[in-house]
């Protein structure tokens, strides 16, 4: 088994998402999040379209906004156990224009994972705006893992 991260948090043991986010200024995509009565965190439409999915056609980004899945508020306070990236080979796509997770943070996550890393000039949703590059990374991870595992 191998892991592929696409513009993602690479949290280490003992860390929480909230603690990591509090280390720097709020990113543009997360500037106006709100929590509903059930404790789920949502992005505002403007921030989703203009920052989270900044390199996606605005009409398509609005559809993505309409069907977004909220994040449970507890995700910000839950503390990570032993991360899988410590025992599994990892690949990481850095979204160079990400306004949700700073690209420099993504590079740090990838580095401490020892991940094979590629960077694309993308917003946070590289899988939508750069699907070919994402698919290429996934294929490379599968191929490289098969080569080293004998599979």
Image (cartoon, helix red, strand yellow):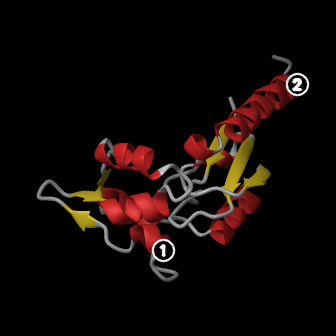
Q: Furthest residue to the left? A: 37
Q: CA distance from mark 1 to mark 2?
A: 39 Å
Q: Position of residue 131 (x, y in %)?
A: 64, 37
Q: Would you say residue 43 is visible in this rendering?
A: no
Q: Secondary structure at mark 1?
A: loop
Q: Position of residue 5 (x, y in %)?
A: 63, 46
**Residue 48 x, y percent position in the rendering:** 40, 59
Screen quadrant of the C terminus: top right
Label ID, residue 147:
2
Query: Which residue is drawn at the image coordinates 31% and 67% (left, top)?
Result: 33
First-in-chain label (1 vs 2)? 1
Q: Nearer the viewer, mark 1 or mark 2?
A: 1
Q: What residue lies at 21% left-to-right and 63% top-to-bottom?
A: 35
> 83 and 22: which one is in front?
22
Rendered residue at 46%/73% (across/down): 28
Q: Could you classify mark 2 by the number of other residues whose Cα lies within 10 Å: few (under 14), some (14-19), or many (20 or more)?
A: few
Instruction: Give above or below for 4 relative to 39.
Output: above
Q: Which residue is mark 1?
A: 27
Crowding at dot 1, Cα within 10 Å, few <14 / some 14-19 / many 20+, comes out as some
């Amino acid at each position: 088994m191998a892991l592929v991260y696409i513009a993602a948090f690479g949290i280490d043991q003992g860390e929480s998402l909230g603690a990591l986010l509090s280390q720097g200024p709020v990113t543009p995509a997360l500037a106006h999040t709100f929590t509903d009565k059930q404790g789920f965190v949502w992005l505002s439409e403007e921030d989703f379209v203009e920052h989270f999915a900044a390199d996606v056609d605005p009409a398509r980004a609005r559809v993505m906004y309409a069907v977004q899945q909220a994040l449970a508020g507890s995700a910000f306070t839950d503390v990570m156990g032993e991360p899988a990236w410590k025992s599994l080979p990892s690949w990481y796509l850095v979204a160079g224009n990400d306004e949700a997770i700073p690209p420099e943070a993504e590079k740090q996550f990838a580095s401490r994972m020892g991940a094979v890393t590629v960077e694309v000039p993308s917003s946070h949703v590289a899988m939508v705006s750069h699907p070919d590059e994402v698919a290429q990374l996934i294929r490379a991870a599968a191929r490289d893992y098969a080569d080293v595992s004998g599979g």
